[in-house]
Amino acid sequence: MERPIRVLVAKPGLDGHDRGAKVIARALRDAGMEVIYTGLRQTPEQIVNAAIQEDVDVVALSILSGAHNHLLPKVVELLKDEAVYDEMLVIGGGVIPDEDIPFLKEKGLAEIFTPGTPTQVTIDFIKGNLKRA
Amino acid sequence: MFEKEKLDQQKEKDKGWNENKVEKVLSKFPERRKQFVTGSNLKVKRLYTPADVEALDYDGDLGYPGQYPFTRGVQPTMYRGKFWTMRQYAGFATAEESNKRYKYLLEQGQTGLSVAFDLPTQIGYDSDHSLSEGEVGKVGVAIDSLKDMEILFDGIPLDKVSTSMTINAPASVLLAMYIAVAEKQGVAADQLRGTIQNDILKEYIARGTYIFPTAPSMRLITDIFEYCSQEVPNWNTISISGYHIREAGSSAVQEVAFTLANGIAYVEAAIKAGLDVDTFAPRLSFFFNAHNDLLEEVAKFRAARRLWAKIMKERFKAKSEKSMQLKFHTQTGGSTLTAQQPDNNIVRVAIQTLAAVLGGTQSLHTNSKDEALALPTEDSVRIALRTQQIVAYESGVAETIDPLAGSFYIENLTNTIEQEAMAYIEKIDALGGSPQAIEKGFIQKEIMDSSYEYQKQIESGDRIVVGMNKFQVKEAAPKGLLRVDPSVGELQKDKIRQLKAERDNSLTEAKLAELRKAAVGTENLMPFILEAVRAYATLGEVCGVLREVFGEYQQSVIL
């Protein structure tokens, strides 16, 4: 049997806005994926540990605190240090200004989903861009 | 309110209208939808008539403004006396920058201050803590010590303004700093007016800036109730908040239910701590959201007022009328704003402003059009404030009290929201009260279900958000968004280094040691916290001591 896509939904940073993270987690689950949600206030180290431990295909980072330019690239760096970045698709979402998106993509985020994105768009993106076959 | 005979005739007429008129039209022109619902999915009928409010008793259910059960408002003259307080939530970067914004807002006719703190401050970390990296000054102002607080209120006379502070877990520390700044201005604590949010239960449920476990958190809250009832009598010691519950995706009914259930938990905790209900209850205040379904929101505010009055009178046997009055601040709904075509948000905020005012709010923050994108710019904050001023001075809705009362729909909806909220409160009581219901994840799960349902309605097109899932246009990326200078973090770190070099460190240490001892015991902690901040202990040091003694809250992760 084919292994379902495994996704870690994580909240880096100190903000407590997890409505989006929870909605996306449920939507991915309804789309047949296995979803692990970290809860709030996760450091990049904690997120990377969880991603490795859970052997996920996707790391989905939700942040609304404004600290995205600092924290999201850090997660990517640590995934690279642990030599798992080539296996894991890293995406982000939240209140992130459009002008920050090129910088984040350059740093290794595959896509950034901003407010108003239908969950189906994220689901399709994940299905079409997995790094592991 | 209606004679039985007339009411029976009316019901016959209702039936006749349905059969003779409506059915005929429907057979040719079906309605837009099979079922109509409110913004929170309550069913809406085609028409409301006296039959829908037949049990309404004017004196018992509505009464007069300023009188039990306060359905029509908490003051006898409401906005004819004075308008609601126009209070824009603001704060970013450093205390110096925020101080400038406050002075600007006061010059523009704002009548009260509302302080937004950055996340490290809200979670009790100094700007030089490793977890503060990247977060300093981002969503609010960074306050590390009394020094920052002195700068924040420099040139603002604290006996003249009322100040609301959105601070929860470390509320006692920020309140202590405020009292200490006032002392330096020569203003006595009993002259201070304002509010601290201080509502930890909704942090566990929806907002996320908790520090300590439930029991010591409740102790800090009741310590504040007790201390303020004696020393800072004009201070609102808590703002029991439905705002964030609604933002997390709850329905209007859930917003009322979970907020009042939290209110019940605070009252019970204070009574258990030995306080008399009428000494602290008059200083309890509330904070609600205003969304786009204008009439549902108005009914929600009225229902909340009536339900709280009954709870205080019947359940807690309050005697003072002030204990029964639900006074509330409103903020327009952040989650209703769209990143798409952001100018449309001005219209949404205007509708929400009307809802808050027609619902009898005591103060109001109107969101700025760009808040789905970033912190608001000065220009967009001014439009938001002007929206309130236009409603106040031009719309006419503030000239008479509770003008929608007596509408068959509004009264019916007010009843429905009250009844459904009460049913939730009974469920929560059965679980052992709100703290237990949170621990079991009941409240979070209910909110989550509503929020997911809403998302599905949006994605199926069953619910339309203009500019987002219908009437879209291609637009260029917005320009001119406010950005916080990333050097703020370094600046704050420098300030802490300097503070620690200049202050009397042995005095600070001694005061922190006394606080630790008191925290282990059962004394009221407020005087100890005040002593520590006067000795320039940092926020992180004070919270650090309390973390050592109390431990930290572990969130139950609910999906």
Image: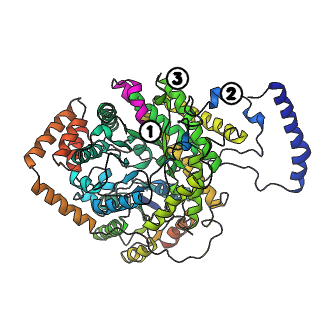
Q: Quadrant of residue B302?
A: top right
Q: Residue at x 18, y 48 (%)?
A: B537
* Displayed quadrant of residue A61: bottom left
Mark positioned earlier in the residue sequence (2 or 3): 2
Q: Is residue B96 left or right of residue A86?
A: left
The amino acid marked with disc number 1 is Ser
Q: Position of residue B383 (x, y in %)?
A: 51, 63
Eye-nearest disc, 2 or 3: 2
Name the residue nearer the viewer: A92 or B233: B233
Q: Which residue is mark 3?
A: B314
User: Residue A113 or B52: which is nearer the viewer?
Assistant: B52
Q: Which residues are magenta?
A: B270-284
Q: Main secondary structure of the magenta part?
A: helix
Residue type for callout 2: Asp
Asked if badges 2 and 1 are on one and the same chain, I answer: yes
Question: Where does residue B118 sit, x and y in percent of width and height?
Answer: 33, 56
Q: Image point 66% across, 48% down: which residue?
A: B38
Mark 2, residue position: B57
Q: Which residue is mark 1?
A: B285
Q: Is residue B383 magenta?
A: no
Front residue of this view, candidates A1 and B509? B509
User: Picture coordinates of residue A13 (x, y %)?
Assistant: 34, 59
* Residue B362 image position (x, y, % from top left): 50, 43
Name the mark nearer the viewer: 1 or 3.
Answer: 1
Give whichever of discs 1 and 3 has the lower sequence position: 1
